[in-house]
Image: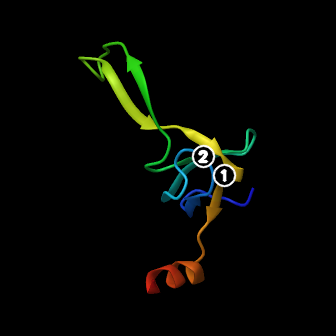
Amino acid sequence: MFVKTGDKVKVIAGKDKGKEGNVLSVDVKNDRVVVKGVHKIKKHQKPSQANAKGGVVESEGSIHASNVKVISKAENKKNKKK
């Protein structure tokens, strides 16, 4: 897979197109990645010892690896000039 944990990527397709973030985790078997700040999902959780009140928790969901592009250092410099 061309994406590794810690890479800076840009979303090139889907509802979050144009957003950038760092890769938090990679699922090689299913070709999916979790990007910080992209594809936020809400999960309802029951009260537990860790979360006494429970409620709605918002976290990042996974997106397909083909929908992201690694941002190289040269491309990052090019974008800063604009």
Tag 2 or tag 1, which sits nearer the N-term?
A: 2
Query: Residue 27's x, y, as percent?
Result: 67, 43
Considering every residue shown, the one lying at the far left of the view is 53
Label 2 near label 1: C-beta < 8 Å?
A: yes
Quadrant including the N terminus? bottom right
31 to the left or right of 21? right
1 to the left or right of 56? right
Look at label 1 and name its amino acid.
Asn
Query: Residue 73's x, y, as percent?
Result: 56, 80
Q: Depth-wise, is mark 1 or mark 2 nearer the camera?
A: 2
Task: Examine the rendered structure and indicate whether residue 58 appears above or below residue 47.
Answer: below
Identify the residue shown where x is 66% and y is 51%: 67
Q: Quadrant of residue 72?
A: bottom right
Circle 2 packing at 10 Å, graded few (<14), some (14-19), many (20+), is few
Task: Examine the rendered structure and indicate whether residue 41 appears above or below residue 65.
Answer: above
Query: Residue 71's x, y, as percent?
Result: 59, 70
Q: Which residue is mark 1?
A: 67
Look at label 2 and name its amino acid.
Gly
- Cα separation between marks 1 and 2: 7 Å
Q: Which residue is mark 2?
A: 14
Circle 1 packing at 10 Å, graded few (<14), some (14-19), many (20+), is some
Quadrant including the C terminus? bottom left
Query: Residue 37's x, y, as percent?
Result: 43, 49
Identify the residue shown where x is 60% and y is 46%: 14
Q: Nearer the viewer, residue 38 or 52?
A: 38
Task: Examine the rendered structure and indicate whether residue 30 appears above or below residue 20.
Answer: above
38 to the left or right of 25? left
